[in-house]
Image (tube, helix red, strand yellow):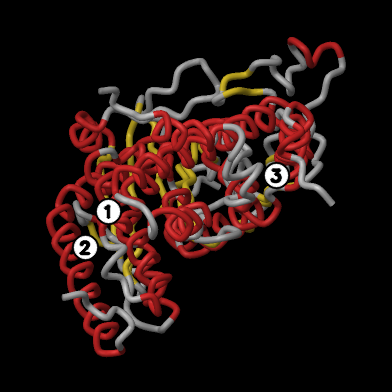
Amino acid sequence: MALLTKKDAGLILDPLADNNPITIQVLGICSALAITAELEASIVMSIAVVFVLGVGNVVISLMRNIIPSKIRIIVQLIVVATLVIIVDQVLKAYAYQLSKTLGAFVGLIITNCIIMGRFEAFALANGPWKSFLDGIGNALGYGVILIIVGFFRELLGSGTLLGYPVFGDPIMKTGLYATGYENNGFMIIPPAALIVVGIIIWVQRSRNPVLVEEN
Amino acid sequence: MAVDTDKNSYTVLFAGIMVLLVGSILAFLASGLRPNIQENERFEKQQNILYAMGVNENGDDAGSVNFIPTEEVEGEFTNFIKEQLVIDENGNIEKNDDAFLIDLKKQLAAKKKGKPFQLPLFIGEMNNNKYYVIPMYGKGLWDAIWGFVALDNTMTVQGVYFDHKGETPGLGANIKMRYFMDDFSGESIMDGTQYAGIAVAKGNNDPLNNTKDDNEVDALAGATITGNGVAAMIKESLNLYKDYLETIRVK
């Protein structure tokens, strides 16, 4: 028997494109604006969200029949906050440099609406295995967009990728800068992320007209 | 028998158990990991102090900030830092080999409330030069910023290290990038006989920071408030140590 049925594989693959949490479900936009000025930050945030959403979905799914409906949002918040604190503390104890790199991102996960969105929309109604796959799939779909946005913002805004100069030295005017090229300062401020996300949505919907909502 | 999860008594019981459970897990985790975390923070502080006085593993690649390895930092710290001083509210100076453990944030809070406080200062020696390393603490845009500045006895900056808690990645967070920190080296903190600090100036038309006697370095794009925070932090911290610095300053 295959490890993943076709439906299970869909849970992982759909959020990567046609049911992407950012471009289609419009979840997690705020963090996509806030932390994508650098590619490294985008990658680190994506990995952290994969962990928190994967495990969080399983925990919520296991508890789904005993959570009182009146306080379910609070319970979800407690679960995600606990996971985030555990990740933060373990990193500080055993991977200190990485925890420094993560900085504010780990805390930001608590307010990431993808997490609550998937708890509400999926984990409360499905079993742990399916919820795990849904969590991983959605976090990866979120990560893909974050990395694409981070790539363009860092490249065009700072002329670097993962901190390495790609276009030359902007101060000494070497490489591409010698020809008169200038870094686009607009790309490193958050509104630029909206434009990049908008372009991704545009490309995605023009390639797949099914995604376009009817008036 | 199915439980009625909508009952008020169930809701209260569930919330109580959940709080107890989560509280216990986090308390257990925090107390178990505390020794490791404290050790990591101690090493980091030593690395930061050494970085400010120029003991680091930075290569020619101007983009990277490299500390000396964690395994070696304790040994190197005792090699390079010859004296650790503590200055109290009355200006008394004492030697204290654990001065680097003093939490500047708490001391500044105590000072604000008019309570007794202690200010740490480190004297390092490298290639027969003396470095006076001053810890700093201030406010950025979102949260705390802190760092160390290493001076010589002419009050010229020999190196700095800045760090932050939650500045925006790609913008204010760049205060800990090497291209920004390197600009401070060689700047004088004096304007005549006044402790002027160093301004983080926008559009000073000196991106390479060739002019070292203007008390100015080039600002970071899109991070005005964090940059101003850095300038304010330097000025306020130097003011705290002014009396001591006057005793070592070569006029």
**SS at mark 3 in the image:** strand
Rendered residue at 35%/63% (across/down):
B119
Task: Name the mark on residue A86.
Answer: 1
Q: Which residue is mark 3?
A: B216
Residue type of the residue flagged with mark 3: Glu
Q: Which residue is mark 2?
A: B26
Contact, mark 2 vs mark 1 (Cβ under 8 Å) = yes
Asked whether the viewer can see residue A110, the reply is: yes
**Badge 2 or badge 3: first in the primary sequence:** 2
A187 vs B19, left or right, is right
Neighbor class of circle 1 (other Cα within 10 Å; few <14, some 14-19, many 20+) is: some
B237 vs A125, left or right, is right
Contact, mark 2 vs mark 3 (Cβ under 8 Å) = no
A107 vs B9, left or right, is right
**SS at mark 1 in the image:** helix
**Mark 2 and mark 3: span between their CA atoms?**
46 Å
The residue furthest right is A180
**Which chain's residue wears label 2?**
B
Q: Quadrant of residue A18?
A: top right
